Amino acid sequence: MAIIQFPEGMKWGTATASYQIEGAVNEGGRGTSIWDTFSKTPGKVVNGDNGDIACDSYHRYEEDVELLTDLGVDVYRFSVAWPRIFPNGTGEVNQEGLEYYHRLVDKLIEKGIEPMCTLYHWDLPQALEDKGGWNNRETIDAFVQYAELMFNEFSGKIKSWLTLNEPWCISFLSNYIGAHAPGNKDLQLATQISHHLLVAHGLTVKKFRNLGIEGKIGFAPNTTWLEPYSNRQEDIDACNREIGWYIEWFMDPVFKGNYPEFMLDWFKKKGVQLEIKDGDMEAIQQRVDFLGINYYTGHIARYKENSGLLDWELVEMNYDRTDIGWPIFPEGFYNVLMRIKESYGDIPIYITENGSCYNDEPENGQVKDNGRISYLQQHLTALSRAIASGVNVKGYITWSLLDNFEWAEGYSMRFGIVHVNYRTLERTKKDSYYWFKQTIANNWFEN
């Protein structure tokens, strides 16, 4: 057995998102979000599930902070529901919403846990969507206004901020593939939204700097990895397009000040033309203090003409898969981190999401989720390899603390290290919770 040791000062944590856990959608002055609307549209979410109650963390946050305290985490990543702060997206501030997050943050600080706040984890106020959503540049201004309020309100309390979670999902998954709210299927629209998101990110970072807020700020793109089936250039190019759609498309503008030419050329072939206004690229290229990386899965692929948007196909290799069907591909995690280091240098990195779906249920009060433990071992070993290879990793935050509302999958898929009974809302620590607790305490594990 090899001992996988992590650097001194490594920060350990776990993550959640507001719509997935809070519930209380009609309480505390909260406005309607696009996920309230989408989840109640027939056929959009498995079983017609919605986040009306979710894990009821709005009322049970103290119980959830106790779970974090017992776990021994250094950091807890959560998101703020924009409609709790501005029920209409702009205008009147909802004081009750602010007070809820103050109670949560104060409790975290009391327990010695660092709050890491994601400003946008997909729950856009419906009032803004009704005016065009992220395709309307007024939403950019509304987001910066919302962020400014949060920065000033929580200055000195929250010292780690993320602007956006998974901009690829916000733009392409939600507006081209149409699987998430608001459910559009328009490549031009999705691509333009991806640009507006980056402008919103950049202007928010600029506002953070101008306000002189104590702390650090970054964003959290989701990543994937496709390993070429062969060394043929067409296979390599096909895989690079898919990786580039997630990584270079959202990172090059931030770190290099431009979009990747190979992706611009490809989109142009598909009839897509970005509208970039004067000052946009300068706004996007604000210095970030750290980069959040979300990674779950990857695969082997090769070129196939006229196959999907990017002309590639998966080649089935019979990898083990999690219960949501995603291949377990820790090698891709290592490769993603190495690619980012090679492309963008030694930017400090937090793994802001990494985890797995296993739908194990309690038996005699125990949840034996050995698959999740194995997944964590494999991916933390890949992370250790990346650190040993010079990647500047500062912390690892697993997804997720709780089983929760898994977006279009509703309550059918469980990612938590704590089981939630959705009828009684009882929390049960899984075996993976205890494994992760031991790993945090030791700062190492045996593999």
Image: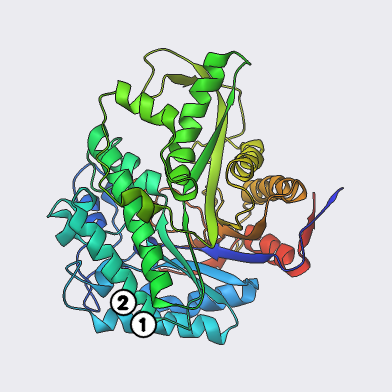
Q: Residue furthest right?
A: 1
Residue shown at the point (61%, 23%) measured from the top left: 317
Q: What residue would you read off at disc 1?
A: 153
**Is 385 left, or right, of 234 in this rendering?**
right
Query: Distance between the Cα atoms at labels 1 and 2?
Result: 6 Å
Residue 373 x/y as whole percent: 67, 51
88 or 422: nearer the viewer: 88
Estimate the x, y position of residue 277 in percent, counting from the top left: 25, 46
x, y percent for residue 58: 36, 75
Q: Are marks 1 and 2 in contact (CB under 8 Å)?
A: yes
* Residue type at the position of mark 2: Leu
Residue 267, placed above or below residue 341: above
Determine if residue 423 is in view.
Answer: no
Q: Residue at x 56, y 21 (%)?
A: 236
Checking the image for residue 149, the label placed there is: 2
| SS type, badge 1 | helix
Say whether residue 152 is visible: yes
The front one of 22 and 236 is 236
Most extreme residue toward the front is 278
Say what amino acid the circle numbered 1 marks. Glu
Q: Nearer the viewer, residue 347 or 53?
A: 347
